[in-house]
Image: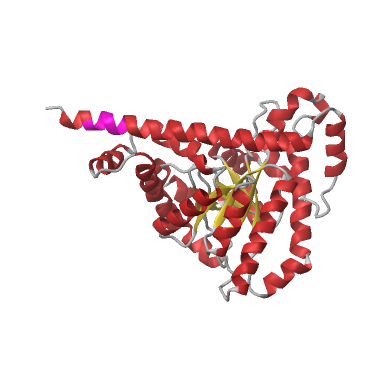
């Protein structure tokens, strides 16, 4: 049996961390669904920047929207949602078969809103309305300012993918926000079934820490943080507070492993996928990692509910001089700043393309 199918049968959803119009047009995404057990996907500004800059697949749509008077963020949102609606329709069977736990696609609010609670709520409402798909998540970063926006969006019934989480503490803060949003819905007599996932970024820990750690501890930090967070996730699902919400019909906010492509060329290319196999979770991976795991991936057991050796590994890493709390905050800040940079590049790329296409259309 294919390794991707083994993960699926274990109870872990495999999502693609990519979307391009070409993937949709040439049938690649449909093939991933049929052959590699892919049941959802995630997107971000960097992914769309690469997709739009990587060829001419978006040119006709950019030109038509520019002629219609659209520009900037408005044009991009329309462009992205065209792709995401198509992808959402491909995943609709998985969405329906899983009772709406799987089969999702994700669209990010502007990264410029990472520190703007009110702006994030307004943007989430707009994207949710404009998306017109039940299986579309709106992505809000789990920054301190994002946490109240996440709670409010859940209360409003907007499905949320919480992004840019790096630590167990950051995860627990957004899990609390999710539950508060659901509790408020129940108090208001509203349906408690609002989809959500919490996305923990893994490999960036090791990129940041390897250089100051002995070789024996290289590429162990991200997995240890994942183990620690999985323990907290399992404890939350077993808690009386959550069990009360579940009894009222609420669905769990699933834990999602993000940034699972191996960045260290000396490490196995399937490192994080194999290490983070666990039921009731999601792993979103780039095409390259998906191909590698489908080809030669192996399962070495599943994550332990008690976190396994996470505490011992984290203690060793802290003893080697890594301030884990400070690094978690830095990674979140750096991640938000990187998305802002990609966002600005993306909007500039679209503006440049629109201008060039306009000039081409005027040529005799």
Q: Is residue 19 left or right of residue 197?
A: left
- Classify 214 as above or below 230: above
Residue 53 shows up from this direction: yes
Residue 281 shows up from this direction: no
Image location of residue 179, percent across then percent down: 67, 62
Q: Is residue 252 left or right of residue 63?
A: right
Q: Nearer the viewer, residue 2 or 47?
A: 47
Magenta residues span 353-358
Residue drawn at x 50%, y 39% is 112
Residue 178, image quadrant: bottom right
Quadrant (top left, top right, bottom left, bottom right) of the C terminus: top left
The secondary structure that dominates the magenta segment is helix
Image location of residue 288, percent across then percent down: 56, 36
- Classify 52 as above or below 161: above
Residue drawn at x 60%, y 43% is 294
Image location of residue 176, percent across then percent down: 69, 58
């Amino acid at each position: 049996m294919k390794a991707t199918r083994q993960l699926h049968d274990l109870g872990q959803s495999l999502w693609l961390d990519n979307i391009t119009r070409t993937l949709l047009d040439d049938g690649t995404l449909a093939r991933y669904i049929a052959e590699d057990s892919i049941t959802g996907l995630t997107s971000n500004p960097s992914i769309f920047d690469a997709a739009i800059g990587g060829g001419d697949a978006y040119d006709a749509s950019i030109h038509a929207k520019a002629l219609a008077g659209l520009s900037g963020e408005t044009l991009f949102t329309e462009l992205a949602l065209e792709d995401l609606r198509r992808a959402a329709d491909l995943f609709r069977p998985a969405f329906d078969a899983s009772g709406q736990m799987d089969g999702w696609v994700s669209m990010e609010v502007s990264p410029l809103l990472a520190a703007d609670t009110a702006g994030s709520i307004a943007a989430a409402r707009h994207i949710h309305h404009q998306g017109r798909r039940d299986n579309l998540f709106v992505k809000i970063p789990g920054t301190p300012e994002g946490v109240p926006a996440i709670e409010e969006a859940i209360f409003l019934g907007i499905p949320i993918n919480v992004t840019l989480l790096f630590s167990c503490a950051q995860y627990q803060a957004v899990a609390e926000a999710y539950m508060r949003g659901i509790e408020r819905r129940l108090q208001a007599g509203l349906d408690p079934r609002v989809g959500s996932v919490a996305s923990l970024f893994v490999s960036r820990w090791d990129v940041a820490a390897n250089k100051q750690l002995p070789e024996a501890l290289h590429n162990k930090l991200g997995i240890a943080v994942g183990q620690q967070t999985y323990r907290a996730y399992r404890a939350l699902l077993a808690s009386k507070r959550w069990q009360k919400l579940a009894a009222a019909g609420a669905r769990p906010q699933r834990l999602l492993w993000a940034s699972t492509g191996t960045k260290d060329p000396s490490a196995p290319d399937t490192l994080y996928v194999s290490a983070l196999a666990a039921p009731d979770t999601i792993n979103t991976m780039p095409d390259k990692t998906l191909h590698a795991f489908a080809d030669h991936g192996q399962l070495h057991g599943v994550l332990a509910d008690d976190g396994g050796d996470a505490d011992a590994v984290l203690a060793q890493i802290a003893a080697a001089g890594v301030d884990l709390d400070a690094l978690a905050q830095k990674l979140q800040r750096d991640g938000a700043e990187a998305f802002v940079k990609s966002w600005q590049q993306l909007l500039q790329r679209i503006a440049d393309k629109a201008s060039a296409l306009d000039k081409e259309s005027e040529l005799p």
